[in-house]
Image: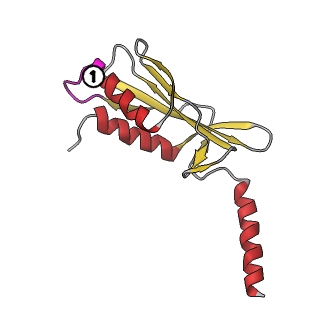
Amino acid sequence: MRKILLVIALAGFMVILSGCSPPTFVRTSVANWKTVEFRPGLEREDAWHRIADTLAKNYDIEVIDKESGYIRSGWMYNLSGKINENYRTRVIVNIPVSNDKVELKIDAHWFDSSNWIPGYDTLLLNQVYTDVQGSVGRVTR
């Protein structure tokens, strides 16, 4: 009897979880940009190639424009390595022409059964920030 109750409780819990957004999703309509300053002596051209290579290793690049310094991945429909049609994310990178920094953000959308809710994903934002920081960022001591 306890096993049956446990199975029913777990099934109910999974149904409840399937209707909730991921814990890393932050609902907002305001962009949450993070900035990485280039390490000293790193030229924009070299930084551009390093950043593009870093992103291309993990994401399908949908738009890339070297002149404007813009890179955007396609939408990714996965969550913790599993396909999830109710959650999508993409990476957006901007390298201003006159600066020695890169700006990045993550767009995330959660589908609540009728609408896409905009926001960003904290886990993915930190992951991309760490990757880019390691590629072109200043070294901290």
Q: Which residue is mark 1?
A: 46
Q: Is residue 133 left or right of residue 24?
A: left
Query: Residue 122's x, y, as percent?
Result: 51, 45
Badge 1 amino acid: Asp
Residue at the bottom extreme of this rendering: 1
User: Is 27 covered by the magenta stretch?
Assistant: no
Q: Which residues make up the magenta segment?
A: 38-45
Give the vertical position of 81 relative to 14 (above or below).
above
Q: Is residue 117 left or right of residue 65?
A: right
Residue at image location 63% in from the left, 32% down from the top: 29
Residue at image location 74% in from the left, 53% down from the top: 19
Give the vertical position of 13 relative to 37 (above or below).
below
Q: Nearer the viewer, residue 30 or 24?
A: 24
Query: Residue 106's x, y, as percent?
Result: 52, 35
Q: How is the image coloured?
A: secondary structure
Residue at image location 30% in from the left, 22% down from the top: 100
Query: Residue 64's x, y, as percent?
Result: 47, 20
Residue at the top extreme of this rendering: 67
Q: How many badges with numbers are in the image? A: 1
Q: Quadrant of residue 47?
A: top left
Q: Nearer the viewer, residue 1 or 119?
A: 1
Give the vertical position of 12 relative to 56 (above or below).
below
Q: Quadrant of residue 138?
A: top left
Q: Quadrant of residue 37?
A: top left
Q: Let me know if residue 33 appears in the view.
A: no
Residue at image location 67% in from the left, 42% down from the top: 110
